[in-house]
Amino acid sequence: MANNNIPEYTVTELSNALKNVVESSFDKVIVKGEVSRIFVAQSGHAYITIKDEISVLETICFKNVFEKIELTPEQGLEVHCEGRMSTFSKKSSYQLIINDIRPAGLGALMAMLEARKLKLMKGGYFNDKNKKKLPYLPDVIGVITSLKGAVIKDILHRFKDRFPREVLIWPTLVQGEGASSEIIKAIKGFNEISTGNKIKKPDIIIIARGGGSIEDLWCFNDEDLIIAVSKSEIPIISAIGHETDTTLIDLASDFRAPTPTAAAEIAVPVKLELIEKLSSFTSRLISSLSRTLKQARSEFNSASRGFKSPESNIENYSQRIDFAASKLRTYLKQKINLYYDKVSANRISNKNILYNFSYKKKEFNLAEKSLLKLLGSNLTELDKRNKLISSNLKKDLIISPLKLYFEKMHYSKKILETLSYRNTLNRGFALIRSTNDKKPIDSVGRAIKEDIIEIEFYDGSVDAKLLKIRKKQIESSVKKNIHKKNIQEKLL
């Protein structure tokens, strides 16, 4: 029988009752714990699990609140979560609806920062060898910062005072959720500007922000941002906070400026100072050249004293040439007259030349006729001697020895064919050779040493392998035959 004093509820009624009790009892609480898991849904709501040494608490931070939280919670970070307790009836669970999240003390935040610093240091992102050299006078300067505040004004004003340059500004958030991702996009955007683009690619990038607490500057400790800074092809100057503020981006950048104004001073020199330096260098160069020219002129004058003037040398050589020319002219006249006298003395008339030529021609014809006659007589005599020698030679004296040699050769050939081992092979015998050196095998002892032997017949050869050796049986049979022969001889 049911007890009428016990109240009766439906599931929904009980769930709503519990919800009212929990929400009224814990309408505003602060829970301290360590973030063990964080999940951001597509809706933008963040589901965060916090824990202590014993218990676990599920929390939810709705999108409109999560976007305003300055510090994004990370796994392992100890936090203070402010909100109200509620229940979720579909799972029969309770949860904390978060209104704000803060780190549970500076020590926890610094411990997480130190762990991240060691991790990035091991990855080589802070190595000085990988840092790029800043250009002395960049043509285009890219600035990544917020358009709100005095930072961008101070940088532009400093550029104007020192050395006006073309400045490209990429506005981003510099605090809170999404700031690090916007700065990463700006770095990649500057690096991806092509050379043919109307917008010039910066020669240097300045990332700047004013001062603030460690929570305000936390986006500049983002791991993905540090990697993007170290991989940038364009040199980067970091100017975050005041001189005492230090973030991980300062360690990864190519140069760290203590303030945004100092970053502008590092990026460009002072134009007036540069002009003064150039003027000083120009005057020093001119004075140095003047001294060098004076010294060279002095050395030239000293050296020229030891040499005669070119005009005097030319005049001397000109006189010597005239004198030599007159002597040459007289000498040539004398030689020409001498040769002319010799030619006149030895001159021969044309008649004498023709007479000598005809006389020599007759002598040549007589000598030709006598030579042909002598050759004809010698050829006749040689022909007679040749016929006499041919008649005296008899053919038998040459043919008979040839017949004798042919018969001897035919006889020797028959003997060789009779004694050849091939005739023996034709009678049914075979020749056994070694496959190694092709020498005949004449005993079982030699055959044992061979793995494969070659057997030659009258019409070809084959290779054979020894399977069984009957050497002892052969020896015993031979001994029996010898013994039997001895007995027969004794009986006879």
Image: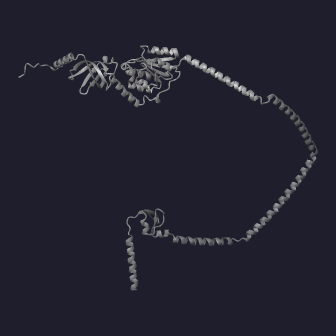
Apparent side of residue 277 relative to residue 307 in the rendered image (left or right): left
Q: Residue at x 39, y 76 (%)?
A: 479
User: Can residue 46 be seen by looking at this rendering?
Assistant: no
Residue 327 location (% of width, % of height): 88, 36
Residue 362 location (% of width, % of height): 89, 53
Q: Quadrant of the N terminus?
A: top left
On the image, which quarter does residue 464 sit in?
bottom left
The foreground one among 195 and 480 is 195
User: Can residue 21 be seen by looking at this rendering?
Assistant: yes
Q: Residue at x 37, y 27 (%)?
A: 114
Apparent side of residue 437 relative to residue 87 in the rendered image (left or right): right
The foreground one among 424 and 51 is 51
Give the residue furthest to the left: 1
Apparent side of residue 474 relative to residue 303 in the rendered image (left or right): left
Q: Is residue 484 above or below residue 300?
A: below
Q: Residue at x 75, y 67 (%)?
A: 387
Q: Quadrant of the C terminus?
A: bottom left
Q: Is residue 265 above or below residue 355?
A: above
